[in-house]
Structures are given as structure tokens and as C-alpha cells.
Image (cartoon, rainbow, N blue to C red):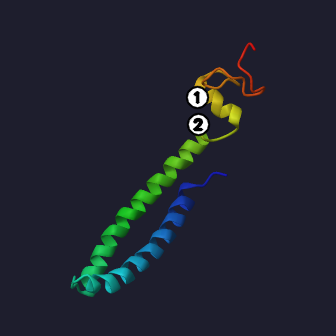
Amino acid sequence: MSQTRTMSFMETATSVAAGFLLSLGMQVVLFPAVGLQSTLTQNLKLALGFTVLCLARSYWVRRVFEHLGRTGTPGSGSISGKINALTGRPGMCTHGHDSNRGAKAGE
């Protein structure tokens, strides 16, 4: 099933928003535990910077995988389709075996 760009963005934004809140909470708890002192404003700026980066990365990765899923690249579709994509020979693996019979071609 394919996903629209808008839905990809919405899913990514929701995930990243949850990550932002977790990140902010972890900074407030962990920074003092390791001897780092920061204000809430500094924590917000740091979390926001990483959140913007994370949003862009997540969206880009999702779109790449959506594109790969549509183009029928190796890793998607049937086994014989994968073999065909890898070898250029329908039903033949890289060692010359017929994927439909399990024997070497011509045997």
C-alpha cells in the first residue's frame, strides 16, 4: 500500500513530536545527572534543533522507501522477481540454479 506525501509527513511529524517531548524530558533529568547545567530555554532550543533535523531525516527516509517499493527494486515482490532483478534471467539464481525446480539449469 502506498502512502501519500502528506500522510508520510503527518506520520513523521507525530512520531517526531513524541520524540521531542521524550528528548526534552530526558535532557531535564539526565543533564544534571552528568553534571551539565542548562536552563529550560536552552533545553528547548537544543531539543527543537534536533527535532527539525529528525523530522527532515525521517521524512526523507520514508520517501526513499516509498520510491523503492514502487519501482520494484530487489527486496520487493516475489522471489522470482528478486532473482530476475539480480540476475537479469527469469527464474535463474546467480549460481545458475532454476528457482522453479531447484536444480542447475540444463541438469
Amino acid type, residue under disc 1 in the picture: Leu
In the figure, 76 relative to 106: above or below? below
The residue lying toward the viewer, choosing from 34 and 24, is 34
In the figure, 98 relative to 75: above or below? above
Q: Secondary structure at mark 2?
A: loop
In the image, 59: left or right of 32? right
Q: Quadrant of residue 20?
A: bottom left
Q: Secondary structure at mark 1?
A: helix
Residue at 45% of width from left, 59% of height from top?
58
Tag of residue 30: none
Q: Quadrant of residue 83?
A: top right
Residue at 44% of width from left, 53% of height from top?
60
Which x, y percent locates residue 49?
30, 69
Residue at 60% of width from left, 24% of height from top?
94
Residue at which label 1 appears:
86
Residue at which label 2 appears:
74
Which x, y percent locates residue 71?
58, 38
Residue at 40% of width from left, 59% of height from top?
56
In the image, 5: left or right of 2? left
In the figure, 83 relative to 7: above or below? above
Disc 2 to disc 1: CB gap under 8 Å: yes
Please count the marks in the image.
2
Tell me the CA gap for discs 2 and 1. Answer: 7 Å
Q: Quadrant of residue 90?
A: top right
Amino acid type, residue under disc 2 in the picture: Pro
In the image, 30: left or right of 39? right
* Structural crowding at the residue carrying mark 2, measured as other residues with C-alpha within 10 Å and reported as few (<14), some (14–19) or many (≥20): some
